[in-house]
Image (cartoon, rainbow, N blue to C red):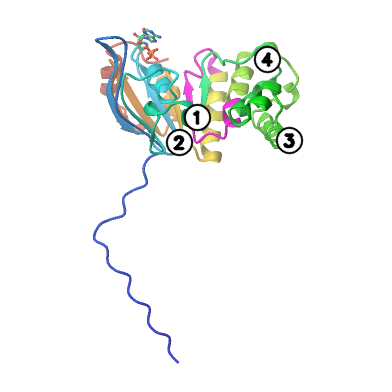
Amino acid sequence: MAAEPAAAAPQTLVPASPAPATLEIRGLTKEYRRGTPVLRGISLAFPDRGITAVIGPSGTGKSTLIRCINRLVEPTAGAILFHGADMARLSGRALREHRRRIGMVFQEYNLVERLTVMENVLSGRLGYLSSWQAFLRRYPPQDIAMAWELLDTVGLTQYANRRADALSGGQRQRVGIARAVMQQPDILLADEPTSSLDPKTSVEIMELLAGITDTRHIPVIVNIHNVPLAKRFASHVIGMAGGAIVYNGPPGGLTDDHLNQIYGGEDWQE
Ligand code: ADP
């Protein structure tokens, strides 16, 4: 007996709405001093993959933008939608739970210098431990296994038991990156991660970040003042000037006119 023909799927005229971006900001404003905005109502959806480079002259608000995202800096107004939840409105446990899914890499590494490399990397899990576990720094075996894996990824296995202050700048930044990835973040923020490093090490650190976005399928947002490095590694560029966005597109679309607009004649070629 022939099977009943399946009922035709109803035709839908309304296209399915696209999945919301992992991170979107709306009307983000920051004033450290009332009446003097550093960020002037910035709105944008960050790409869900690849490296997004935020470029612009010193003092234009790049670091403030990055730090508002995880609330290291309190925004004055606007929304920061991370997986649809407004980071600007969260507090207490909800803020902690969202924040631990946002990894952060710093210019000056922010390691605990007297602790070992392994202890620094493991500290990326602190947000997942109960308070007594955190107090005793008692990490479950799977965290320790993950830390060894990451030390291998960043090429520091043989340094696991060295104190952080015995390492070079590039090695410290690798520890900082491994610590951030230990959080199993859904997004990685990097605030001038190469500014304290020599050109060769800067390239190695950018390669490492590029590897992370590729293998872990998470977006990486890098505040970086080195335009050639940004163009080489980023799949998306946000150009800022005077606390506003003046370019938002692929690196290939960034012209000298854009760069002059962003840097206002200041030298951007390094
Ligand atoms: P960028 O990262 O582009 O160099 P920043 O976000 O660090 O820019 O700084 C933008 C502006 O905000 C600068 O004028 C800076 O002096 C000011 N600023 C940054 N942090 C603070 C702070 N904690 N208190 C007061 N002003 C600040």
Residue 227: horizontal and vertical position, in percent?
40, 21
Horizontal side of 58 relative to 247 (left or right) equals: right
Which disc number belongs to residue 141? 3
Mark yes or no: residue 249 visible.
Answer: no
Left or right relative to 160: residue 123: left
The mark that comes first in sequence, 4 or 2, is 2
Q: CA distance from mark 3 to mark 1?
A: 25 Å
Badge nearest the viewer, 1 or 4? 1
Measured in 3D between alpha carbons, the distance from the residue under mark 2 to the one under mark 3, in whole angstroms, is 31 Å
Q: Which numbered disc covers residue 50?
A: 2
* Mark 2, secondary structure of its residue: loop
Q: Which residue matches tag 1?
A: 93
Q: CA distance from mark 2 to mark 1?
A: 29 Å
240 lies above or below 125: above
User: Residue placed at 44% from the left, 25% from the top?
Assistant: 70
**Mark 1 and mark 4: Cα distance apart in space:** 30 Å
Q: Is residue 214 above or below residue 29?
A: below
Q: Kindly identify which residue carries mark 4.
A: 164
